[in-house]
Amino acid sequence: MRFLQKNKKQTFMQGAMILVAGTLIAKLISAAFKIPLQHYIGNTCMGIFNSAYQYYTIMFVIATAGVPVALSKLVSEANALGRGHEVKRIAKLAAVVFFSFGALCSVGLFIGADLIARLSNNPMAIEAIRAISPAVFFVSVVAVVRGYFQGMSNMIPTALSQIIEAVGKVVLGLLFAWFAGAKGFDDPMKAAFAILGVTVGEILAAMVMLIYAASASKKSYENNLNDRCRSYRELLRVLLLTVIPVTLTSSVTSITTLVDTGMLVRRLQEIGYTLQEANALYGVYTGQAFTMFNFPQTLITALATAVLPAMAGAYAQQNHTMAAKNMGSAMRIAMLIALPACIGYIVLAHPIIELLFAEDSTGMVDAGLGGSLLQVLAIAIPCVALVGLTNAILQAIGQMKVPVITMLIGGLCKIGLNYFLVGNPKIHIYGAPVGTLACYTLIATLNLIYLKQYIKLPNIDKLFIRPFAACIGMGAVAAIVYRPLSETLGNAAVLPAICVAALVYVILLVGLNALERDDILMLPAGKHIVKMLRL
Protein backbone atom coordinates (compact mmCIF):
# COMPACT_ATOMS: atom_id res chain seq x y z
CA MET A 1 0.00 0.00 0.00
CA ARG A 2 1.51 3.32 -1.04
CA PHE A 3 0.94 6.38 1.10
CA LEU A 4 1.89 9.58 -0.60
CA GLN A 5 2.39 13.13 0.50
CA LYS A 6 2.23 16.56 -1.02
CA ASN A 7 5.44 18.49 -1.10
CA LYS A 8 4.28 21.57 0.69
CA LYS A 9 5.58 21.70 4.25
CA GLN A 10 3.38 23.04 7.00
CA THR A 11 4.72 24.67 10.16
CA PHE A 12 3.49 23.31 13.48
CA MET A 13 1.09 26.21 14.03
CA GLN A 14 -0.19 26.18 10.44
CA GLY A 15 -0.95 22.49 10.81
CA ALA A 16 -2.65 23.18 14.13
CA MET A 17 -4.80 25.92 12.61
CA ILE A 18 -5.80 23.63 9.74
CA LEU A 19 -6.88 21.01 12.27
CA VAL A 20 -8.67 23.57 14.43
CA ALA A 21 -10.55 24.89 11.40
CA GLY A 22 -11.44 21.37 10.23
CA THR A 23 -12.51 20.35 13.73
CA LEU A 24 -14.58 23.50 14.16
CA ILE A 25 -16.38 22.91 10.86
CA ALA A 26 -16.95 19.25 11.75
CA LYS A 27 -18.31 20.16 15.18
CA LEU A 28 -20.68 22.76 13.76
CA ILE A 29 -21.92 20.17 11.29
CA SER A 30 -22.25 17.61 14.09
CA ALA A 31 -24.28 20.11 16.08
CA ALA A 32 -26.67 20.06 13.12
CA PHE A 33 -27.05 16.35 13.92
CA LYS A 34 -27.28 16.05 17.69
CA ILE A 35 -29.33 19.16 18.34
CA PRO A 36 -32.23 18.36 15.97
CA LEU A 37 -31.86 14.68 16.86
CA GLN A 38 -32.40 15.56 20.52
CA HIS A 39 -35.54 17.48 19.51
CA TYR A 40 -36.81 14.66 17.33
CA ILE A 41 -36.20 11.47 19.32
CA GLY A 42 -36.35 12.84 22.90
CA ASN A 43 -34.17 12.40 25.98
CA THR A 44 -34.89 8.72 26.63
CA CYS A 45 -33.97 7.70 23.08
CA MET A 46 -30.96 10.04 23.22
CA GLY A 47 -29.81 8.27 26.36
CA ILE A 48 -29.94 4.94 24.48
CA PHE A 49 -28.06 6.53 21.54
CA ASN A 50 -25.29 7.87 23.80
CA SER A 51 -25.02 4.60 25.74
CA ALA A 52 -24.42 2.67 22.52
CA TYR A 53 -21.97 5.33 21.34
CA GLN A 54 -19.92 4.95 24.55
CA TYR A 55 -19.68 1.17 24.05
CA TYR A 56 -18.49 1.81 20.51
CA THR A 57 -16.00 4.38 21.78
CA ILE A 58 -14.19 1.93 24.05
CA MET A 59 -13.80 -0.58 21.20
CA PHE A 60 -12.74 2.22 18.87
CA VAL A 61 -10.09 3.30 21.38
CA ILE A 62 -8.76 -0.24 21.76
CA ALA A 63 -8.55 -0.69 17.99
CA THR A 64 -7.36 2.70 16.79
CA ALA A 65 -6.76 5.40 19.42
CA GLY A 66 -3.01 4.87 19.63
CA VAL A 67 -2.52 4.46 15.89
CA PRO A 68 -2.43 8.08 14.64
CA VAL A 69 -0.33 9.15 17.63
CA ALA A 70 2.18 6.31 17.32
CA LEU A 71 2.40 6.56 13.53
CA SER A 72 2.82 10.34 13.55
CA LYS A 73 5.55 10.02 16.21
CA LEU A 74 7.50 7.29 14.41
CA VAL A 75 7.09 8.82 10.96
CA SER A 76 8.14 12.30 12.12
CA GLU A 77 11.21 10.88 13.92
CA ALA A 78 12.27 8.80 10.89
CA ASN A 79 11.74 11.74 8.55
CA ALA A 80 13.68 14.10 10.83
CA LEU A 81 16.62 11.65 10.80
CA GLY A 82 16.57 11.33 7.01
CA ARG A 83 15.14 7.80 6.79
CA GLY A 84 12.67 8.14 3.94
CA HIS A 85 12.52 4.42 3.11
CA GLU A 86 11.74 3.61 6.71
CA VAL A 87 8.81 6.05 6.66
CA LYS A 88 7.14 4.07 3.86
CA ARG A 89 7.87 0.76 5.58
CA ILE A 90 6.26 1.98 8.83
CA ALA A 91 3.10 3.00 6.96
CA LYS A 92 2.79 -0.36 5.16
CA LEU A 93 3.28 -2.29 8.39
CA ALA A 94 0.72 -0.21 10.27
CA ALA A 95 -1.86 -0.74 7.52
CA VAL A 96 -1.58 -4.53 7.63
CA VAL A 97 -1.64 -4.78 11.43
CA PHE A 98 -4.36 -2.30 12.28
CA PHE A 99 -6.75 -2.94 9.42
CA SER A 100 -6.86 -6.56 10.58
CA PHE A 101 -7.25 -5.66 14.25
CA GLY A 102 -10.00 -3.16 13.48
CA ALA A 103 -11.97 -5.85 11.64
CA LEU A 104 -11.71 -8.21 14.62
CA CYS A 105 -12.91 -5.50 17.01
CA SER A 106 -15.92 -4.72 14.81
CA VAL A 107 -16.94 -8.38 14.77
CA GLY A 108 -16.44 -8.66 18.52
CA LEU A 109 -18.62 -5.62 19.23
CA PHE A 110 -21.41 -6.94 16.99
CA ILE A 111 -21.40 -10.43 18.47
CA GLY A 112 -21.09 -9.19 22.06
CA ALA A 113 -23.75 -6.46 21.82
CA ASP A 114 -26.35 -8.43 23.78
CA LEU A 115 -23.94 -9.28 26.62
CA ILE A 116 -22.52 -5.73 26.83
CA ALA A 117 -25.94 -4.09 27.04
CA ARG A 118 -27.26 -6.53 29.63
CA LEU A 119 -24.19 -6.26 31.85
CA SER A 120 -24.72 -2.49 31.97
CA ASN A 121 -28.39 -3.02 32.85
CA ASN A 122 -29.52 -1.23 29.67
CA PRO A 123 -30.91 -3.87 27.25
CA MET A 124 -32.57 -1.09 25.22
CA ALA A 125 -29.15 -0.35 23.66
CA ILE A 126 -28.54 -3.76 21.99
CA GLU A 127 -29.65 -2.86 18.45
CA ALA A 128 -27.89 0.51 18.54
CA ILE A 129 -24.60 -1.20 19.49
CA ARG A 130 -24.94 -3.60 16.57
CA ALA A 131 -25.70 -0.73 14.18
CA ILE A 132 -22.51 1.13 15.08
CA SER A 133 -20.18 -1.90 15.35
CA PRO A 134 -18.93 -1.85 11.68
CA ALA A 135 -17.67 1.70 12.20
CA VAL A 136 -14.70 0.40 14.23
CA PHE A 137 -13.08 -1.20 11.16
CA PHE A 138 -13.50 1.88 8.98
CA VAL A 139 -12.15 4.11 11.74
CA SER A 140 -9.01 1.96 11.79
CA VAL A 141 -8.53 2.66 8.07
CA VAL A 142 -8.95 6.39 8.63
CA ALA A 143 -6.60 6.28 11.66
CA VAL A 144 -3.69 4.77 9.72
CA VAL A 145 -3.96 7.29 6.89
CA ARG A 146 -4.28 10.17 9.35
CA GLY A 147 -1.28 9.03 11.37
CA TYR A 148 0.98 8.82 8.33
CA PHE A 149 0.11 12.26 7.02
CA GLN A 150 0.27 13.83 10.51
CA GLY A 151 3.79 12.47 10.87
CA MET A 152 4.65 14.17 7.58
CA SER A 153 3.24 17.45 9.02
CA ASN A 154 0.29 17.41 6.63
CA MET A 155 -2.90 17.95 8.65
CA ILE A 156 -5.21 18.37 5.64
CA PRO A 157 -6.29 14.69 5.43
CA THR A 158 -7.20 14.65 9.12
CA ALA A 159 -9.28 17.81 8.81
CA LEU A 160 -10.89 16.53 5.61
CA SER A 161 -11.85 13.17 7.14
CA GLN A 162 -13.41 14.89 10.17
CA ILE A 163 -15.64 17.00 7.93
CA ILE A 164 -16.68 14.00 5.81
CA GLU A 165 -17.54 11.98 8.93
CA ALA A 166 -19.66 14.83 10.23
CA VAL A 167 -21.50 15.42 6.94
CA GLY A 168 -22.28 11.72 6.56
CA LYS A 169 -23.51 11.52 10.13
CA VAL A 170 -25.77 14.56 9.77
CA VAL A 171 -27.38 13.79 6.42
CA LEU A 172 -27.80 10.04 6.79
CA GLY A 173 -28.27 9.92 10.57
CA LEU A 174 -31.19 12.34 10.48
CA LEU A 175 -32.61 10.63 7.40
CA PHE A 176 -32.46 7.22 9.08
CA ALA A 177 -33.98 8.63 12.30
CA TRP A 178 -36.81 10.19 10.28
CA PHE A 179 -37.44 6.88 8.52
CA ALA A 180 -37.59 5.00 11.84
CA GLY A 181 -39.99 7.56 13.25
CA ALA A 182 -42.20 7.44 10.16
CA LYS A 183 -42.41 3.67 10.47
CA GLY A 184 -43.46 3.95 14.10
CA PHE A 185 -40.47 2.07 15.51
CA ASP A 186 -39.91 2.06 19.28
CA ASP A 187 -37.12 4.01 21.05
CA PRO A 188 -34.41 1.29 20.81
CA MET A 189 -34.89 0.93 17.05
CA LYS A 190 -35.05 4.70 16.50
CA ALA A 191 -31.74 5.05 18.33
CA ALA A 192 -30.26 2.23 16.21
CA PHE A 193 -31.30 3.88 12.96
CA ALA A 194 -29.99 7.28 14.13
CA ILE A 195 -26.61 5.87 15.13
CA LEU A 196 -26.30 4.07 11.79
CA GLY A 197 -25.42 7.50 10.37
CA VAL A 198 -22.16 7.38 12.35
CA THR A 199 -21.24 4.08 10.70
CA VAL A 200 -22.00 5.34 7.20
CA GLY A 201 -20.07 8.55 7.89
CA GLU A 202 -16.98 6.51 8.82
CA ILE A 203 -17.34 4.40 5.67
CA LEU A 204 -17.38 7.55 3.53
CA ALA A 205 -14.38 9.00 5.39
CA ALA A 206 -12.38 5.78 4.91
CA MET A 207 -13.11 5.71 1.18
CA VAL A 208 -12.05 9.34 0.72
CA MET A 209 -8.87 8.86 2.77
CA LEU A 210 -7.82 5.87 0.67
CA ILE A 211 -8.48 7.82 -2.54
CA TYR A 212 -6.50 10.79 -1.15
CA ALA A 213 -3.56 8.53 -0.24
CA ALA A 214 -3.57 6.81 -3.63
CA SER A 215 -3.88 9.95 -5.74
CA ALA A 216 -1.53 12.34 -3.92
CA SER A 217 1.66 13.15 -5.82
CA LYS A 218 4.64 11.05 -4.85
CA LYS A 219 6.61 12.52 -1.99
CA SER A 220 10.22 13.42 -2.74
CA TYR A 221 11.92 12.90 0.61
CA GLU A 222 13.99 15.98 1.20
CA ASN A 223 15.53 14.41 4.30
CA ASN A 224 16.26 11.03 2.68
CA LEU A 225 19.96 11.34 3.46
CA ASN A 226 20.66 7.63 3.93
CA ASP A 227 19.21 4.21 3.16
CA ARG A 228 19.14 3.05 6.78
CA CYS A 229 15.91 1.17 7.43
CA ARG A 230 15.04 -1.16 10.29
CA SER A 231 13.51 -4.56 9.58
CA TYR A 232 9.76 -5.14 9.66
CA ARG A 233 10.20 -7.20 12.83
CA GLU A 234 12.06 -4.40 14.63
CA LEU A 235 9.61 -1.76 13.40
CA LEU A 236 6.68 -3.88 14.60
CA ARG A 237 8.26 -4.09 18.03
CA VAL A 238 8.81 -0.32 18.18
CA LEU A 239 5.34 0.37 16.78
CA LEU A 240 3.62 -1.80 19.38
CA LEU A 241 5.74 -0.37 22.20
CA THR A 242 4.49 3.05 21.13
CA VAL A 243 0.87 2.12 20.36
CA ILE A 244 0.19 0.12 23.53
CA PRO A 245 0.93 2.86 26.13
CA VAL A 246 -0.82 5.50 23.99
CA THR A 247 -3.85 3.22 23.66
CA LEU A 248 -3.81 2.51 27.38
CA THR A 249 -3.78 6.25 28.05
CA SER A 250 -6.78 6.79 25.81
CA SER A 251 -8.46 3.65 27.13
CA VAL A 252 -8.44 4.91 30.70
CA THR A 253 -10.70 7.80 29.74
CA SER A 254 -12.93 5.62 27.60
CA ILE A 255 -13.12 2.85 30.19
CA THR A 256 -14.09 5.30 32.93
CA THR A 257 -16.67 6.79 30.56
CA LEU A 258 -17.92 3.29 29.82
CA VAL A 259 -18.13 2.57 33.54
CA ASP A 260 -20.01 5.86 33.85
CA THR A 261 -22.46 4.73 31.17
CA GLY A 262 -23.42 1.64 33.13
CA MET A 263 -22.91 3.11 36.58
CA LEU A 264 -24.93 6.30 36.15
CA VAL A 265 -28.02 4.57 34.78
CA ARG A 266 -27.72 1.79 37.38
CA ARG A 267 -27.09 4.11 40.35
CA LEU A 268 -29.97 6.37 39.35
CA GLN A 269 -32.25 3.32 39.33
CA GLU A 270 -30.94 2.26 42.72
CA ILE A 271 -32.04 5.57 44.29
CA GLY A 272 -35.56 5.30 42.92
CA TYR A 273 -35.59 6.35 39.24
CA THR A 274 -37.14 4.08 36.61
CA LEU A 275 -35.05 2.89 33.64
CA GLN A 276 -36.79 5.44 31.39
CA GLU A 277 -36.19 8.26 33.90
CA ALA A 278 -32.54 7.24 34.35
CA ASN A 279 -32.01 7.22 30.58
CA ALA A 280 -33.68 10.65 30.35
CA LEU A 281 -31.34 12.13 33.00
CA TYR A 282 -28.34 10.48 31.36
CA GLY A 283 -29.55 11.77 27.99
CA VAL A 284 -29.63 15.36 29.26
CA TYR A 285 -26.15 15.01 30.78
CA THR A 286 -24.52 13.43 27.71
CA GLY A 287 -26.74 14.83 24.94
CA GLN A 288 -26.88 18.43 26.16
CA ALA A 289 -24.28 19.35 28.81
CA PHE A 290 -21.50 17.00 27.69
CA THR A 291 -22.05 17.77 24.01
CA MET A 292 -21.41 21.47 24.65
CA PHE A 293 -18.59 20.70 27.08
CA ASN A 294 -16.79 18.65 24.42
CA PHE A 295 -16.97 21.40 21.81
CA PRO A 296 -13.89 23.42 22.94
CA GLN A 297 -12.05 20.20 23.86
CA THR A 298 -12.05 19.01 20.27
CA LEU A 299 -10.23 22.20 19.26
CA ILE A 300 -7.60 21.53 21.94
CA THR A 301 -7.24 17.97 20.65
CA ALA A 302 -6.36 19.45 17.27
CA LEU A 303 -3.50 21.37 18.89
CA ALA A 304 -2.29 18.23 20.68
CA THR A 305 -2.39 16.31 17.40
CA ALA A 306 -0.26 18.93 15.68
CA VAL A 307 2.22 19.44 18.51
CA LEU A 308 3.11 15.75 18.94
CA PRO A 309 4.98 15.20 15.63
CA ALA A 310 6.61 18.63 15.98
CA MET A 311 7.85 17.77 19.48
CA ALA A 312 8.90 14.24 18.46
CA GLY A 313 10.89 15.53 15.49
CA ALA A 314 12.59 18.21 17.60
CA TYR A 315 13.51 15.68 20.30
CA ALA A 316 14.83 13.19 17.73
CA GLN A 317 17.24 15.93 16.58
CA GLN A 318 18.02 16.89 20.22
CA ASN A 319 16.63 20.38 19.58
CA HIS A 320 15.24 21.06 23.06
CA THR A 321 14.91 24.80 22.43
CA MET A 322 12.51 24.22 19.54
CA ALA A 323 10.65 21.59 21.56
CA ALA A 324 10.11 24.04 24.43
CA LYS A 325 9.03 26.76 22.00
CA ASN A 326 6.45 24.49 20.35
CA MET A 327 5.13 23.36 23.72
CA GLY A 328 4.79 26.92 24.98
CA SER A 329 2.94 28.02 21.86
CA ALA A 330 0.54 25.09 22.06
CA MET A 331 -0.23 25.68 25.74
CA ARG A 332 -0.81 29.40 25.29
CA ILE A 333 -3.15 28.88 22.32
CA ALA A 334 -4.97 26.16 24.27
CA MET A 335 -5.62 28.48 27.19
CA LEU A 336 -6.79 31.23 24.82
CA ILE A 337 -9.51 28.77 23.74
CA ALA A 338 -10.24 26.97 27.03
CA LEU A 339 -10.49 29.94 29.41
CA PRO A 340 -13.10 31.96 27.46
CA ALA A 341 -15.09 28.76 26.89
CA CYS A 342 -15.07 28.13 30.64
CA ILE A 343 -16.23 31.65 31.59
CA GLY A 344 -18.67 31.86 28.69
CA TYR A 345 -20.42 28.64 29.67
CA ILE A 346 -20.63 29.67 33.31
CA VAL A 347 -22.30 32.96 32.36
CA LEU A 348 -24.51 31.79 29.47
CA ALA A 349 -25.00 28.05 30.00
CA HIS A 350 -28.75 28.17 30.57
CA PRO A 351 -29.71 30.29 27.54
CA ILE A 352 -27.31 28.31 25.32
CA ILE A 353 -28.87 24.98 26.32
CA GLU A 354 -32.42 26.35 26.12
CA LEU A 355 -31.76 27.84 22.68
CA LEU A 356 -30.23 24.71 21.20
CA PHE A 357 -32.11 21.86 22.83
CA ALA A 358 -35.77 20.99 23.24
CA GLU A 359 -37.46 21.12 26.63
CA ASP A 360 -38.36 17.77 28.16
CA SER A 361 -42.08 17.19 27.59
CA THR A 362 -42.29 14.00 29.68
CA GLY A 363 -41.82 15.66 33.06
CA MET A 364 -38.94 13.26 33.85
CA VAL A 365 -36.29 16.01 33.84
CA ASP A 366 -36.21 19.27 35.81
CA ALA A 367 -36.21 22.48 33.77
CA GLY A 368 -32.74 23.98 33.50
CA LEU A 369 -30.93 20.74 34.36
CA GLY A 370 -28.78 20.78 31.21
CA GLY A 371 -27.59 24.35 31.85
CA SER A 372 -26.76 23.65 35.50
CA LEU A 373 -24.76 20.53 34.58
CA LEU A 374 -22.87 22.49 31.91
CA GLN A 375 -21.92 25.20 34.43
CA VAL A 376 -20.22 22.59 36.62
CA LEU A 377 -18.52 20.92 33.66
CA ALA A 378 -17.29 24.30 32.39
CA ILE A 379 -14.92 24.68 35.35
CA ALA A 380 -13.07 21.57 34.16
CA ILE A 381 -12.41 22.83 30.61
CA PRO A 382 -8.94 24.40 31.24
CA CYS A 383 -7.79 21.26 33.07
CA VAL A 384 -9.04 18.97 30.31
CA ALA A 385 -7.16 21.14 27.80
CA LEU A 386 -3.93 20.81 29.80
CA VAL A 387 -4.40 17.05 30.13
CA GLY A 388 -4.75 16.61 26.37
CA LEU A 389 -1.66 18.68 25.61
CA THR A 390 0.59 17.36 28.38
CA ASN A 391 -0.30 13.76 27.49
CA ALA A 392 0.75 14.41 23.87
CA ILE A 393 3.96 16.16 24.93
CA LEU A 394 4.94 13.39 27.37
CA GLN A 395 4.34 10.81 24.64
CA ALA A 396 6.40 12.83 22.15
CA ILE A 397 9.44 13.00 24.44
CA GLY A 398 9.34 9.27 25.16
CA GLN A 399 7.68 9.31 28.59
CA MET A 400 4.94 6.95 27.42
CA LYS A 401 4.13 5.39 30.79
CA VAL A 402 3.48 8.62 32.66
CA PRO A 403 0.14 9.51 31.02
CA VAL A 404 -1.05 5.93 31.56
CA ILE A 405 -0.39 6.17 35.29
CA THR A 406 -1.82 9.67 35.78
CA MET A 407 -4.91 8.90 33.69
CA LEU A 408 -5.48 5.72 35.70
CA ILE A 409 -5.25 7.64 38.98
CA GLY A 410 -7.67 10.27 37.68
CA GLY A 411 -10.03 7.63 36.29
CA LEU A 412 -10.21 5.81 39.64
CA CYS A 413 -10.93 9.14 41.32
CA LYS A 414 -13.78 9.79 38.87
CA ILE A 415 -15.31 6.33 39.30
CA GLY A 416 -15.20 6.58 43.09
CA LEU A 417 -16.74 10.05 43.21
CA ASN A 418 -19.42 9.16 40.68
CA TYR A 419 -20.43 6.06 42.61
CA PHE A 420 -20.91 7.87 45.90
CA LEU A 421 -22.23 11.21 44.60
CA VAL A 422 -24.68 9.90 41.98
CA GLY A 423 -25.91 7.37 44.56
CA ASN A 424 -26.87 10.24 46.86
CA PRO A 425 -30.53 11.14 46.16
CA LYS A 426 -29.84 14.82 46.95
CA ILE A 427 -27.07 15.01 44.34
CA HIS A 428 -28.01 12.29 41.77
CA ILE A 429 -26.89 13.22 38.20
CA TYR A 430 -24.98 16.30 39.43
CA GLY A 431 -22.35 13.93 40.81
CA ALA A 432 -21.18 13.11 37.26
CA PRO A 433 -19.79 16.57 36.35
CA VAL A 434 -18.25 16.92 39.82
CA GLY A 435 -16.40 13.64 39.28
CA THR A 436 -15.21 14.86 35.87
CA LEU A 437 -13.89 18.11 37.37
CA ALA A 438 -11.97 16.34 40.15
CA CYS A 439 -10.58 13.74 37.72
CA TYR A 440 -9.05 16.16 35.22
CA THR A 441 -7.80 18.61 37.83
CA LEU A 442 -5.82 15.79 39.44
CA ILE A 443 -4.42 14.49 36.12
CA ALA A 444 -3.38 17.96 34.91
CA THR A 445 -1.56 18.67 38.18
CA LEU A 446 0.34 15.36 38.10
CA ASN A 447 1.29 15.75 34.42
CA LEU A 448 2.63 19.27 34.89
CA ILE A 449 4.68 18.23 37.94
CA TYR A 450 6.28 15.41 35.97
CA LEU A 451 6.75 17.38 32.74
CA LYS A 452 8.61 20.12 34.62
CA GLN A 453 11.49 17.69 35.15
CA TYR A 454 12.14 17.41 31.40
CA ILE A 455 11.25 20.72 29.80
CA LYS A 456 10.81 24.31 30.89
CA LEU A 457 7.15 25.21 31.31
CA PRO A 458 5.84 28.49 29.82
CA ASN A 459 5.50 31.62 31.93
CA ILE A 460 2.28 31.42 33.97
CA ASP A 461 1.61 35.15 33.49
CA LYS A 462 0.85 34.95 29.76
CA LEU A 463 -0.26 31.34 29.96
CA PHE A 464 -3.02 31.88 32.50
CA ILE A 465 -3.18 35.15 34.45
CA ARG A 466 -3.55 37.70 31.63
CA PRO A 467 -5.92 35.57 29.49
CA PHE A 468 -8.03 34.87 32.59
CA ALA A 469 -8.26 38.60 33.35
CA ALA A 470 -9.43 39.19 29.77
CA CYS A 471 -12.01 36.41 30.20
CA ILE A 472 -13.44 38.01 33.34
CA GLY A 473 -14.03 41.23 31.41
CA MET A 474 -15.47 39.24 28.52
CA GLY A 475 -17.86 37.38 30.84
CA ALA A 476 -19.08 40.60 32.43
CA VAL A 477 -19.80 42.11 29.01
CA ALA A 478 -21.64 38.94 27.91
CA ALA A 479 -23.94 39.14 30.95
CA ILE A 480 -24.53 42.89 30.51
CA VAL A 481 -25.42 42.53 26.82
CA TYR A 482 -27.59 39.43 27.26
CA ARG A 483 -29.92 40.62 30.02
CA PRO A 484 -31.62 43.58 28.31
CA LEU A 485 -31.70 41.88 24.89
CA SER A 486 -33.29 38.73 26.34
CA GLU A 487 -36.43 40.72 27.17
CA THR A 488 -37.16 41.09 23.46
CA LEU A 489 -35.14 38.32 21.79
CA GLY A 490 -35.49 35.62 24.44
CA ASN A 491 -32.73 33.00 24.45
CA ALA A 492 -31.66 34.12 20.96
CA ALA A 493 -30.07 37.11 22.71
CA VAL A 494 -27.17 34.78 23.52
CA LEU A 495 -25.93 35.12 19.92
CA PRO A 496 -25.26 38.90 19.92
CA ALA A 497 -23.98 38.57 23.49
CA ILE A 498 -21.37 36.04 22.37
CA CYS A 499 -20.34 38.17 19.38
CA VAL A 500 -19.85 41.31 21.48
CA ALA A 501 -18.06 39.35 24.21
CA ALA A 502 -15.68 37.78 21.66
CA LEU A 503 -14.76 41.21 20.29
CA VAL A 504 -14.16 42.54 23.81
CA TYR A 505 -12.03 39.47 24.60
CA VAL A 506 -9.71 40.10 21.64
CA ILE A 507 -9.40 43.80 22.57
CA LEU A 508 -8.57 42.90 26.18
CA LEU A 509 -5.98 40.33 25.09
CA VAL A 510 -4.20 43.00 23.05
CA GLY A 511 -4.60 45.62 25.77
CA LEU A 512 -3.23 43.31 28.47
CA ASN A 513 -0.34 42.20 26.20
CA ALA A 514 -1.48 38.58 26.62
CA LEU A 515 -0.40 37.50 23.11
CA GLU A 516 3.10 36.29 22.20
CA ARG A 517 4.51 37.78 19.01
CA ASP A 518 6.30 34.52 18.05
CA ASP A 519 3.08 32.51 18.39
CA ILE A 520 1.25 34.82 15.99
CA LEU A 521 4.12 34.78 13.48
CA MET A 522 3.70 31.01 13.09
CA LEU A 523 0.07 31.46 12.06
CA PRO A 524 -1.04 31.79 8.43
CA ALA A 525 -0.64 35.50 7.52
CA GLY A 526 1.12 35.91 10.87
CA LYS A 527 3.25 38.85 9.73
CA HIS A 528 0.17 40.82 8.69
CA ILE A 529 -1.57 40.07 12.00
CA VAL A 530 1.48 41.18 14.00
CA LYS A 531 1.70 44.38 11.97
CA MET A 532 -2.02 45.09 12.44
CA LEU A 533 -1.86 44.48 16.20
CA ARG A 534 1.48 46.35 16.45
CA LEU A 535 3.09 43.61 18.55
Image (spheres, rainbow, N blue to C red):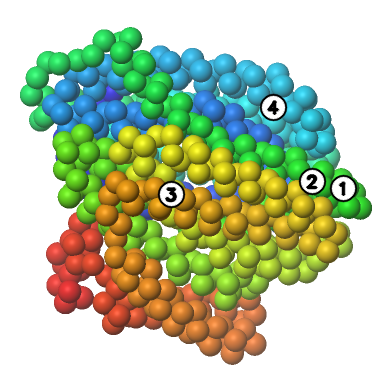
Q: Secondary structure at mark 4?
A: helix
Which residue does the numbered mark 2 point to in the structure image? 265
In space, the residues marked 2 and 4 are separated at their CA atoms by 20 Å
Q: Position of residue 401 (x, y in %)?
A: 43, 34
The answer to whether residue 451 is left or right of residue 169 is left
Residue on which the image places disc 4: 130
Q: Which mark is residue 447?
A: 3
Question: Comparing marks 2 and 4, which lies closer to the viewer?
Answer: 2
C-alpha separation, residue under disc 4 versus residue under disc 1: 25 Å
Query: Along the polypeptide, which appears first: circle 3 or circle 1?
Result: 1
Whole-Å distance between the Cαs marked 3 and 4? 37 Å
Classify mark 3: helix, strand or loop. helix
Q: Residue furthest left?
A: 225
Visible in this render: residue 90? yes
Q: Residues at badges 2 and 4 in contact (C-beta under 8 Å)?
A: no
**Residue 269 disc label:** 1
Give the amino acid type for the residue marked by disc 3 in the picture: Asn
Task: Return the residue nearer the eye: 221 or 458.
Answer: 458
Q: Left or right: where does residue 2 sit relative to residue 470? A: left
**For discs 4 and 1, the disc positioned in front in the rendered view:** 1
